[in-house]
Amino acid sequence: MSDIFAGSQFIELELFYTIQKNKHGTASVTIVPPEQAHKMLADEKTKESVKCLRTKWLQQSWRAAHDLVTASMEYNHTNDRMKFNPHLYRDAKLKACLQDWDAKDADGSVIGCNEMTINNLHWQIAAALIDLYEEATEPTQDDATKN
C-alpha cells in the first residue's frame, strides 16, 4: 500500500524514566532524554535506576483524526457555541493511538494497555508518552524549512 495511507504498521517508541521516592514516600518521576538514558544504562552505578517503557502506536488516519477532534469539542453555555478542549483531545489521542506496551507488574506479569490502565498512569508518564508520540508524528518547524 502507498505510504500516503495510514496502515496497520505500528510506530514503536521508547520512553526512558527514573522513579525515586521523596522524603514523604511519594514516587517522583523524571523523564530522561534517550541520549542521557543510554549513558546511564552504560554506567554500572546508574543502570538500575533507568527504566524504559516500550510502546506501540497507531498512525492516525484522516477519519481517526477527525473523530478525535469531534470528541474533543465542548458546548460553551456562555456564548452558545462549541469550543475545542485541548485536554480532552490529548486524552482521546493517547487512548486511541497507544496500542501496546511492555509494562509489567511487580510479579513480572504483563499489564494490558487499555483505557483503565492508561487512566492509572502517573500523570508525568502519560504526558511524556503523548509528547513523544506527537514529536514522532507531527512535523516540526525544522521539518517545514527543510522542504
Image (tube, helix red, strand yellow):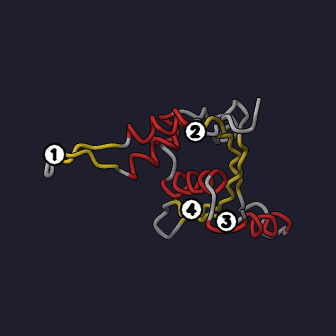
Q: Secondary structure at mark 4?
A: strand
Q: Which residue is mark 2?
A: 97
Of callouts 4 and 2, the N-terminal one: 4
Q: Secondary structure at mark 2?
A: helix
Q: Which residue is mark 3?
A: 32
Query: CA–CA distance between discs 3 and 4?
Result: 9 Å
User: Which amino acid type is shown beneath numbered disc 1?
Assistant: Asp
Residue 38 image label:
none
Q: Which residue is mark 4?
A: 29
Residue in the image at 46% along x and 66% along y: 24
Residue in the image at 59% along x and 38% along y: 60
Mark 1 and mark 2 residues within 8 Å of each other at the beta carbon = no
- 4 or 2: mark nearer the eye: 2
Of callouts 1 and 3, the N-terminal one: 3
Q: Which residue is mark 1?
A: 80
Residue in the image at 64% along x and 42% along y: 106
Query: CA–CA distance between discs 1 and 3?
Result: 44 Å
Q: Picture coordinates of residue 97 (x, y %)?
A: 57, 39
Mark 4 and mark 1 residues within 8 Å of each other at the beta carbon = no
Query: CA–CA distance between discs 4 and 1?
Result: 41 Å
Q: Which residue is more in the foreground, 117 or 19?
A: 117
